[in-house]
Image: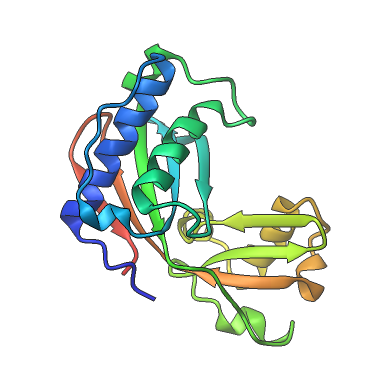
Amino acid sequence: MSQGITDEEGALAVKAAREAMEAHVERRDPEVELPGGFQRKGGAFVTLHEHPRNTLRGCIGFPEPVFSLGESIMRAAAAVCEDPRFPPLSPEETDKVIVEVSVLTVPQPIEATAEEIPGTIEIGRDGLILEKGHARGLLLPQVPAEWGWDAEEFLRNLSRKAGLGSEDWRDAAILRFESAVFTEVEPRGGIVRRGGP
């Protein structure tokens, strides 16, 4: 399920996301040139954390490979400035947030019974998508690891994220993906790989 993204490409992805974020809040066009590897279709999420408290400030992305990887990153970086769960990002805040980019593998259905699904999930490796009727929820692989959840807690929280009851995952479609995660260590600072293949 490897995304085939190098550390150098991951660093470029984070720099591109920061430029797109700053351009959005400054109401200008981003100045980014990404190499050919970013032309392949790929899903990506951009997450912002307040520094140094590391509290979430926004997370938006595209789980499916609808756009080129570069376009997914740029669109997500602009959209995360307007994450509806938070006030719009101000130009002053760009100095105080850490930019993180997750490059996703293509989500694949988990073919298992409800009783078997928790045993197939590896915390820290797997991100999950739940689909049931019009409801849909997604949690990136780093979320359950950060919160210390086991697989069942992961599924219950995923269900709630989709706006459903905590046990509704049992009769929903569950898809699995992995992500290579790259993040700034401080605003505009060095960039490291946090996880993923």
Seen in the picture, residue 111 relative to 126 is either above or below; the reply is: below
Q: Residue at x 25, y 27 (%)?
A: 31
> Can residue 91 be seen in this snapshot?
yes
User: In terms of depth relative to the viewer, which is nearer, 118 or 135?
Assistant: 135
In the displayed structure image, the side of residue 109 where residue 52 appears, left or right: left
Report the quarter where the C terminus lies: bottom left
How far across and down, in percent of the image, does residue 24 sit? 42, 22
Report the quarter where the N terminus lies: bottom left
Q: Residue at x 50, y 55 (%)?
A: 66
Q: Residue at x 74, y 82 (%)?
A: 114
Quadrant of the rendered structure where residue 82 is? top right
In this figure, what is the number of numbered marks?
0
Seen in the picture, residue 106 relative to 94 is either above or below; the reply is: below
In the displayed structure image, the side of residue 97 where residue 151 appears, left or right: right
In the displayed structure image, the side of residue 119 where residue 103 appears, left or right: left
User: In terms of depth relative to the viewer, which is nearer, 107 or 159?
Assistant: 107
How far across and down, in percent of the image, does residue 151 sit? 60, 72
Q: Residue at x 51, y 57 (%)?
A: 140
Quadrant of the rendered structure where residue 174 is? bottom right
How far across and down, in percent of the image, does residue 176 sit? 55, 71
- Colour scheme shown: rainbow
User: In terms of depth relative to the viewer, which is nearer, 156 or 64?
Assistant: 64
Seen in the picture, residue 45 relative to 195 is either above or below; the reply is: above
> Can residue 51 be seen in this snapshot?
no
